[in-house]
Image (cartoon, rainbow, N blue to C red):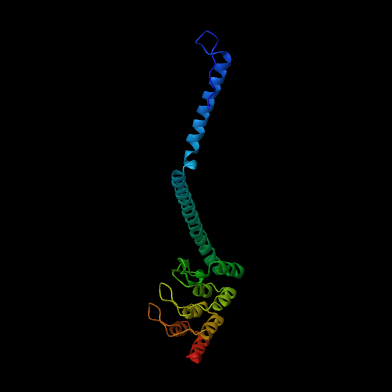
């Protein structure tokens, strides 16, 4: 309640004390109005419920937005990391860095099922091949430690590259009978031809590698 305003005797003008009391009452009324205006939504049950629902909607909307952004960033990072890992994987196979290959396969198991980029065939001629399996590349570059490790992962020992060259054919071309023997023990089929219609035995015969022919005949 506002206090009564006192006036000076015989005058219609409020006294100084009355003016101060009147001013304080106006200040209180104005301040109270501002507070009530700011808190009316909390004080009113209906408006409080509306405000809560609105705040909850905004909160869930913000959390959803943050979640989507975080998922998108994580996905982009994974794709970039996977591309880098894939490049390292093929380089490690060619250089027979077995520890690097094992680390990358443990982190990205699907690398064992990827196809190689265009790579140069070792030798004096500038011959390139592509879409080879990790096992074929290990044979091609004579990376024995990596080859033995890849065999323990049970890959497809008959999968060919872009030219249909299978691991047994590459083993004959590499000239190391260790690879052909290990492939045969793992179930490789030396009768599968490449795109030129030649099998591992045909190449062994062409290159005059009797030991390879005898080994193939033994497992046939």
Residue 82 image position (x, y, % from top left): 51, 62
Quarter of the view holding residue 162: bottom left
Residue extending farthest right: 99
Q: Is residue 78 above or below residue 62?
A: below
Left or right of 149: which side holds 44? left
Look at 40% across and 81% down and name the residue there.
193
Residue extending farthest front: 10
Asked if residue 42 can be seen in this view, the reply is: yes
Residue 207 image position (x, y, % from top left): 47, 82
Q: Nearer the viewer, residue 19 or 185?
A: 19
Asked if residue 123 can be seen in this view, the reply is: no
Q: Nearer the viewer, residue 60 or 157?
A: 60
Disc tally is: 0
Residue 126 image position (x, y, % from top left): 46, 67
Q: Nearer the viewer, residue 115 or 44?
A: 44
Left or right of 145: which side holds 111? left
Residue 87 image position (x, y, % from top left): 51, 63
Look at 51% across and 27% down and name the residue there.
29
Residue extending farthest top: 10
Quarter of the view holding residue 159: bottom left
Q: Nearer the viewer, residue 169 or 67?
A: 67
Quarter of the view holding residue 164: bottom left
Q: Is residue 134 above or below residue 47?
A: below
């Amino acid at each position: 309640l506002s206090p009564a305003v006192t006036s000076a005797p015989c005058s219609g003008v409020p006294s100084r004390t009355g003016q101060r009391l009147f001013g304080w009452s106006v200040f209180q009324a104005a301040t109270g109005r501002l507070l009530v205006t700011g808190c009316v939504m909390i004080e009113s049950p209906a408006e409080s419920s509306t405000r809560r629902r609105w705040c909850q909607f905004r909160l869930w909307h913000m959390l959803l937005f943050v979640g989507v952004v975080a998922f998108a960033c994580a996905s982009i990072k994974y794709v970039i990391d996977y591309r880098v890992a894939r490049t390292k994987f093929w380089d490690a196979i060619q250089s027979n860095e077995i520890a690097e290959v094992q680390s990358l396969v443990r982190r990205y198991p699907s690398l064992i099922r990827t196809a190689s980029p265009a790579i140069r065939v070792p030798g004096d001629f500038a011959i390139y091949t592509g879409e080879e399996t990790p096992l074929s590349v290990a044979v091609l570059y004579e990376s024995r430690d990596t080859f033995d490790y890849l065999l323990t992962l049970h890959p497809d020992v008959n999968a060919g590259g872009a030219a249909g060259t299978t691991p047994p054919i590459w083993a004959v071309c590499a000239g190391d009978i260790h690879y052909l023997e290990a492939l045969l023990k793992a179930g490789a089929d030396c009768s599968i031809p490449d795109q030129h219609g030649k099998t591992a035995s045909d190449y062994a015969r062409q290159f005059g590698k009797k030991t390879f022919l005898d080994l193939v005949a033994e497992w046939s």
